[in-house]
Image (cartoon, rainbow, N blue to C red):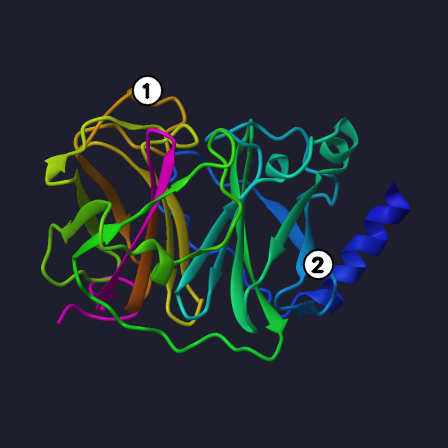
């Protein structure tokens, strides 16, 4: 197994393009542990429209497999994939595809499958946890192919109607979700707002959501992956990323894994975040109603504020 691990680690240097250090992971209440992560793809280079195998490899700060991992938010390993045009997201887990064997866990190597729809850059974000704390890291991968991702469609509207996608098993949905497909003429009306008119970097901002269906507030949302709401928040250019969680107003920090999640809730949800860099940010959310997973998406501009990098305007 040691020989296999060596081959995999060397291989990742050839396969991954634009490897990034982990960015701020939102408001995790758990300490961030020192660890390493790599992702190996097959085929390499990745080809748009072809099924790709992705192997996530985790090691501790001494180079040994990061074992054992804890189940957090319903799974041991979370992978988020977002396209550089900010128009697509996927939220995957190794047990969405196959049974995670003891051998995989001992080696801390986990298999995923995904078909990247178009050529371009994608951020691949990983999250795990052990009894010492949480660990996250992001990579940018290049995908080859004839059909290219489009330019970013800047949309700062704050009220949208989203359809729900029927889950493919309990809390499972492995297909790519496109913003253009998730927005619908009928479905769930989501109103997005912030507690400040002009969000600044390094200052906490509350992002609020109000959900209705057929003009009636939805009060029977249910947990998705052990949280009221999941977030993948990414900056244009893929050089900033946060994976965090929200809940009903007044609920304790949803990245506190001892927090009690109500069986039903709604129609209002919120999350508190601090943006590390100015620019255009896409805020993807995931909520669940009955057996449908709703993927929300809202954009917002963040300007330089107090703290690292500039003064308040």
Left or right of 74, for residue 155? left
> Mark 1 and 2 residues: CB-CB less than 8 Å, in contact?
no
User: Which residue range is magenta in the image?
Assistant: 286-313
The percent coordinates of residue 210 (x first, y second) are 16, 42
**Residue 83, horizontal then vertical, whole percent:** 47, 65
Mark number for residue 274? none
Q: Looking at the picture, tell me which residue is in the foreground, 253 or 146.
A: 146
Q: Is residue 289 magenta?
A: yes
- Is 112 positioned to the left or the right of 180 in the image? right
Specify the label residue 41 is tagged with. Answer: 2
Q: Quadrant of the N terminus?
A: top right
Please report the residue visible at 57 percent of the width from the left and 28 percent of the height from the top: 70
Which tag, 1 or 2, sits closer to the chain's start? 2
Q: Residues within 10 Å of mark 2 (few under 14, many from 20)?
A: many
Q: Which residue is mark 1?
A: 260
List the single residue furthest toward the right: 3
Locate residue 146 relative to residue 255 in the image: left or right.
right
Residue 207 visible? The answer is no
- Given residues 69 and 81, the one toward you in this image is 81
């Amino acid at each position: 197994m040691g020989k296999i691990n060596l081959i995999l680690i060397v291989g990742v240097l050839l396969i991954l393009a634009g490897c990034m250090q982990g960015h701020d992971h939102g408001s995790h209440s758990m300490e961030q542990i020192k660890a390493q992560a790599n992702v190996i793809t097959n085929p390499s280079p990745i080809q748009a429209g072809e099924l790709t195998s992705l192997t996530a490899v985790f090691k501790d700060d001494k180079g040994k497999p990061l074992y054992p991992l804890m189940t957090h938010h319903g799974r041991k390993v979370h992978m988020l994939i977002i396209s550089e045009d900010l128009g697509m997201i996927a939220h995957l887990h190794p047990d969405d595809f196959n049974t995670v064997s003891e051998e995989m866990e001992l080696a801390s190597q986990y298999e995923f499958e995904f078909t990247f729809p178009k050529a371009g850059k994608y951020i691949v974000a990983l999250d795990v946890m052990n009894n010492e704390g949480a660990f996250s890291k992001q990579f940018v991968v290049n995908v080859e192919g004839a059909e290219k991702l489009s330019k970013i469609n800047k949309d700062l509207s704050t009220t949208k109607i989203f359809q729900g996608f029927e889950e493919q098993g309990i809390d499972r949905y492995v297909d790519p979700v496109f913003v253009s497909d998730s927005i619908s003429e009928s479905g769930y009306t989501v109103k997005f707002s912030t507690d400040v008119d002009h969000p600044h970097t390094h200052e906490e901002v509350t992002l609020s959501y109000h959900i209705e269906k057929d003009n009636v507030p939805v009060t029977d949302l249910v947990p998705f992956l052990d949280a009221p709401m999941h977030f993948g928040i990414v900056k244009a250019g893929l050089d900033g990323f946060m994976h965090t969680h929200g809940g009903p107003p007044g609920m304790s920090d949803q990245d506190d894994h001892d927090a009690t999640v109500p069986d039903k809730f709604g129609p209002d949800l919120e999350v508190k975040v601090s943006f590390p860099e100015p620019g255009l940010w896409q805020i993807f959310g995931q909520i669940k109603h009955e057996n449908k997973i709703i993927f929300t998406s809202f954009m917002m501009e963040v300007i330089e504020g107090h703290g690292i990098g500039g003064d308040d305007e």
